[in-house]
Image (cartoon, rainbow, N blue to C red):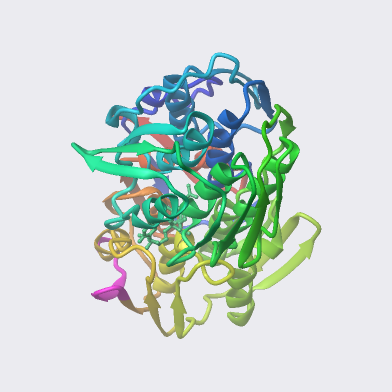
Amino acid sequence: MYVKQFDLTYNDYMEETIFINGGRKLVGEVSVNASKNAFLPIMAGCILCDEQVCLKNYVHISDLALMREILGQLNVSSVLSGRELVLDMSKLQNNKLSHVLTQKMRASIFLLGPMLARFRSAVIAYPGGCKIGTRPIDIHIKSFKSLGAKIIEKHGYLFCNGENLKAGEVTLDFPSVGATESLMMCCVLLKGRSVLKNVAKEPEIVDLEKFLQKMGAKISGAGGDCIVIDGVDKLHGCDFSVMPDRVVAGTYILAVATCGGDALIDGAIAEHNETLLAFLRQSACNIDIEHDKIRIRVGNRLPSIDKIQTMPYPHFPTDLQSQMLVLQSVCKGNCVLKENLFESRFGIVPELIKMGANIVLNGNTAYIQGVEDLFGADVFATDLRAGAGLIIAGLKAEGYTTIHNPFYIDRGYEDIEQKLRYLGAEIKRREI
Ligand code: UD1
């Protein structure tokens, strides 16, 4: 599988392991691909039109392959050539989205909004995804109900009737990224003005707004607390380039901070990772920013950061929590790291302890006492970001590390071993 193919289906991401001989500094240049979390809602948003959409910088990761398969259930044809994905909605049909696919990815719920907008009805099996907590969808359901949708939850499915949907004002109980995106994609086709309040402000929301505008939507305010939408009758196809992945950029930055070295991360937008960069500057990392490149230079072992907590953007992201936890495990001093978004997002901790880390967990808080070094071990990825964190730990550790379940990592990182080899890492895939 590590022979690069260009049209992998979800099932092609089969079981393998990642093998690392750690203990090297990371030196060189690495580039960041387009954002998974921006791509997924944008792909869902394509069904808002009945023409073709060309997405220019496709990323070869299994979550996007899965979204293509889910769209296939709605009779959307997708043709991938290299990095160009053309989705054709001319034969779009309102079909049930069964649990066979939706249970594999939480982002399948993003289709609720566009399906309601296009068909005024939707039947979607409950979404799944990485096991990082209960991850309810009550905010999604409550919001659509407040716009007039009737939603019945039965037999693991959401049966949604949108005949009486009307534009209106919705205030989210919490700024959920997915609920904000799904609502945006519904309201662009609802007659009249919708005002969405207490929305998520993540850069991916801004990218979705740009995409919807390119399709002809009248929408503004993304990136702030309130999004205003004037519904239009119809949207059209377009070409679009999706923004770079701030989590992937942050992962490479944290890898260098943990292992030491000197690396240029190309395609990393500093503004999207300000909290992370502020923490690293506070830890005396050398960081230089030039347009869409970040250079990070780290010589000695870094001091710990006293307190870190995950919060919605622009605060420190939960998607970099595991990777940050690995860095703090080898810093000089103590760190208290609190996870406020997903209650089960500490799956990495028992694995890191196997590698010599000194971490005590109490509820949603990890107490980390930095150790001088980690040692290689056989470890298991428990979710996407925990997997990325384990790669960083393996790169730092003395000796050999084998990471099982790398299919979690393949959900969001394209060719991560090759990219790390560009930085001098000794890392490879092995079939079991
Ligand atoms: C998105 C990201 C994910 C990231 C997360 C938080 C995508 C594809 N995924 O996930 O990588 O970790 O944002 O930044 O973009 N919640 C509810 N009820 C709901 C919805 C959410 O209680 O109806 C809670 C969640 O359990 C969680 C918090 O709100 O505690 C944030 O979730 P949300 O912002 O919705 O995350 P996702 O959109 O699923």
Residue 43 in the image: x percent, y percent?
Answer: 56, 34
| Quadrant, the C terminus | top left
Residue 382 in the image: x percent, y percent?
Answer: 29, 50
Start-end of magenta stretch:
354-365
Is residue 205 rendered magenta in the image?
A: no
Residue 408 in the image: x percent, y percent?
Answer: 37, 42
Q: Outermost residue, right direction?
A: 291
Q: Please report the residue visible at 73 percent of the width from the left and 29 percent of the height from the top.
A: 238
Q: Picture quarter containing residue 31? A: top right
Q: Is residue 249 above or below residue 420?
A: below
Q: Outermost residue, front direction?
A: 164
Residue 319 in view of the camera: yes
Q: Please report the residue visible at 33 percent of the width from the left and 47 percent of the height from the top.
A: 130
Task: Give whichever of 98, 220 is nearer the camera.
Answer: 220
Q: Is residue 416 above or below residue 309?
A: above
Q: Please report the residue visible at 67 percent of the width from the left and 21 percent of the height from the top.
A: 52
Quadrant of the picture in which ligand 1 is shown = bottom left
Residue 299 in view of the camera: no
